[in-house]
Amino acid sequence: MKTVKQIMLVVLGLLFFALQGCSHDDYIPVPGPAGADGTNGTNGINGTTECATCHSKAHTDPVNISYALSVHAIETLHETTNASGATITLKTSEYTNRTGCTQCHTSQGYIDKLNGDVQKTGTGTALGFPAYPGGKQAISCTTCHNKHSSFDFKNDGNDYALRQGFTPVALDTDPTYKMDMGTSNTCVNCHQSRSLPPTSGDVKLSSRFGPHHGPQSSLLEGIQGALIVGTTPYPAPKSAKHRSGASCVTCHMGKTSDGKNGAHTWHPTPNACTTCHTGGAPAAVAGFAADMATLQGLLVAKGAYNATTKAFTTNTVPIKVAQAAWNYAMLLEDRSNGVHNPTYAKALLKNSIEALQ
């Protein structure tokens, strides 16, 4: 028994020294055979060249020059009165910082809307709310552009770092209706009707009666006009050639013809028209001006419009007069002289005139 214990002690001692040797710093493991090579990775893009296509002075200088000619940069001037009753002149963004206006007339308000943030409100003066301070907050580069959602332009397409991207736009007056015009969705966000036409009863008018000042996408889509029953049929929504075969970007941001249109001026360029209008595009739909003058005269006779002040009255009028007034306002504020949707514009005009005669 004593011999067995002695042998076990010797074995344990040898094992101890063996383990000590395995953890010794001088121990050098023997490498195994080399493994198989891995799969080659995908070649990356030349970032400097790819990005410089847009992010270079050669590209951005013309953009800045053309933008300076746009209404977004210049802004429309408006006259109003201050608390003392004196007439003052303001730029759009200097007084449209109120709830309901900020999402299009202030840069941060637009960004907040797209981010899904609740529009800021406050108890302010007649000239606006303090949450969006008065001052120049008009559209700028960073209002519409932020960052790319992908840099794989070859496979994913170039989203031009647009905040809206290519997400369809739910209309403010009907969130169930979504317009999808690709990169032009950025335009649709603001250039749409802000209210709907009346449908029944007598209507009290006001100087602000109508779809507001930017119903371009509504007319282009062929929706949100007052569909007065008449002898001229209304075309189906989305059927206009400028809707199905063109877009806001195509016509308003095409290659400039004189340095004063196209690109970021957003003034329509004739170069965008020649693909379809080989003889040159008309500046207005034939008969549009005459029909608008006729409709205005009828609205004046019905007590709905004041030709001197160029505004609607505050009278209460029958529904047909109110609907005709709505169509007049929509076509006037669209400012394309019917070009955005000639067939729809003609039907709105003809049936409105017919209803008042």
Image: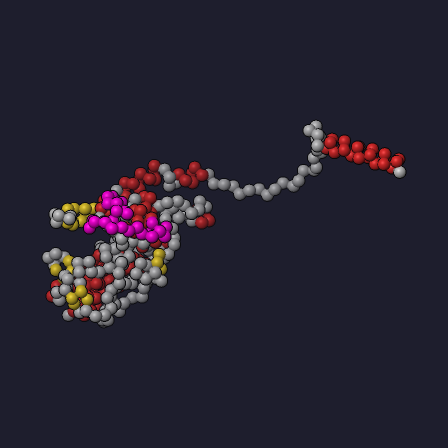
Q: Is residue 113 magenta?
A: yes
At 46% from the left and 46% from the top, the residue drawn is 152
Quadrant where the C terminus is found in the figure: bottom left
- Relative depth, front residue between 132 and 177: 132
Q: Is residue 87 something that shows in the picture? A: no
Relative to 149, is 168 above or below?
below
Residue 180: x and y in percent read: 36, 57
- Relative depth, front residue between 186 and 106: 106
Residue 336: x and y in percent read: 23, 56
- Relative depth, front residue between 30 and 39: 30
Residue 160 horizontal side relative to residue 345, left or right: right
Residue 260: x and y in percent read: 24, 44
The residues colored magenta run 112-137
At 30% from the left and 46% from the top, the residue drawn is 107
Quadrant where the N terminus is found in the figure: top right
- Relative depth, front residue between 119 and 115: 119
Q: Is residue 283 something that shows in the picture? A: yes
Relative to 284, is 136 above or below?
above
Residue 152 horizontal side relative to residue 17, left or right: left
Q: Is residue 350 magenta?
A: no
Residue 37: x and y in percent read: 63, 40
Relative to 179, is 302 above or below?
below
Magenta span dominant secondary structure: loop
